[in-house]
C-alpha cells in the first residue's frame, strides 16, 4: 500500500536528500514516488530510518496518535530496567506482533515498514502489551 499523507511526529532535524532540514512537530508532508516531500523538495525515502524516526502516516487522520504510540512503544522497549527482557519476551511471543518484525533478521527484532504505518488498533494493543 502506498500512503500519501504524513505528519512529523517529533521535530525532524537531519541531513535530507535536499540538504539540512528542521521540520516542526505536526507538519504535514506528502509522499511522492517513494519519497517524503516538504516544500516540494524530497526529504528521505519512505522506508528510510529518517522516515521511521520522524514521520507517521496520516491518510486515516490518525497520524498524531500513530506517532505517539510508535514513540511510546519504542521508548518503553529501549528502557534498560528490570522489566526490559520481559517486555521483549512478550513481543517475541505474541502472534499479533510477529507481522511487524522484519523476517530477514531471525535472532534480532527490527520493526518493519508496516509497524511504523500500522493500524492504530494494533499499535494500541502492542503499547498495552508492554505497558507503554
Image: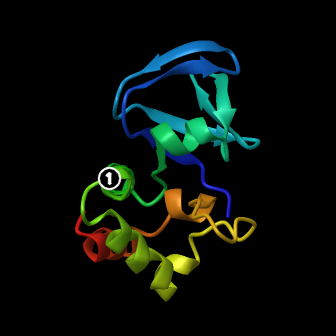
In this view, the residue in front, 122 or 83, is 83
- The answer to which quarter of the image holds residue 27 is top left
Relative image position of residue 24 (x, y in whole percent): 36, 24
Residue shown at the point (49%, 78%) measured from the top left = 92
Residue shown at the point (66%, 32%) measured from the top left = 44
**Quarter of the image with the N terminus in it:** bottom right
Horizontal side of residue 19 vs 128, given as left or right? right
State whether residue 117 appears in this view. no
Q: Which residue is mark 1?
A: 80
Relative image position of residue 16 (x, y in whole percent): 64, 21
**Quarter of the image with the C terminus in it:** bottom left
In this view, the residue in front, 95 or 9, is 95
Q: Find numbered disc 1 in the image and state the secondary structure of the residue it sits on.
A: loop
- The answer to which quarter of the image holds residue 62 is bottom left
- The answer to which quarter of the image holds residue 91 is bottom left
Residue shown at the point (60%, 49%) measured from the top left = 4
Task: Check disc 1: other Cα within 10 Å, few if <14, some if 14-19, many if 20+.
Answer: few
Horizontal side of residue 124 vs 37, given as left or right? left
77 up-or-down from 44: above or below: below
In this view, the residue in front, 2 or 130, is 130
Question: Colour mode?
Answer: rainbow
Relative image position of residue 6 (x, y in whole percent): 50, 44
Relative image position of residue 128 (x, y in whole percent): 26, 73
Amino acid at each position: 500500500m502506498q500512503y500519501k499523507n504524513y505528519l512529523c511526529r517529533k521535530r525532524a532535524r537531519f541531513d535530507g536528500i535536499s540538504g539540512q532540514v528542521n521540520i516542526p512537530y505536526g507538519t504535514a508532508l506528502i509522499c511522492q514516488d517513494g519519497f517524503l516531500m516538504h516544500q516540494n523538495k524530497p526529504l528521505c525515502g519512505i522506508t528510510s530510518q529518517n522516515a521511521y524516526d520522524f514521520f507517521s502516516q496520516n491518510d486515516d487522520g490518525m497520524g498524531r496518535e500513530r506517532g505517539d504510540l510508535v514513540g511510546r512503544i519504542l521508548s518503553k522497549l529501549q528502557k534498560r530496567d528490570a522489566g526490559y527482557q520481559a517486555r521483549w519476551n512478550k513481543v517475541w511471543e505474541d502472534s499479533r506482533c510477529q507481522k511487524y518484525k522484519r523476517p530477514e533478521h531471525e535472532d534480532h527484532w527490527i520493526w518493519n515498514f508496516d509497524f511504523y504505518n500500522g493500524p492504530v488498533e494494533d499499535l494500541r494493543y502492542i503499547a498495552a502489551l508492554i505497558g507503554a
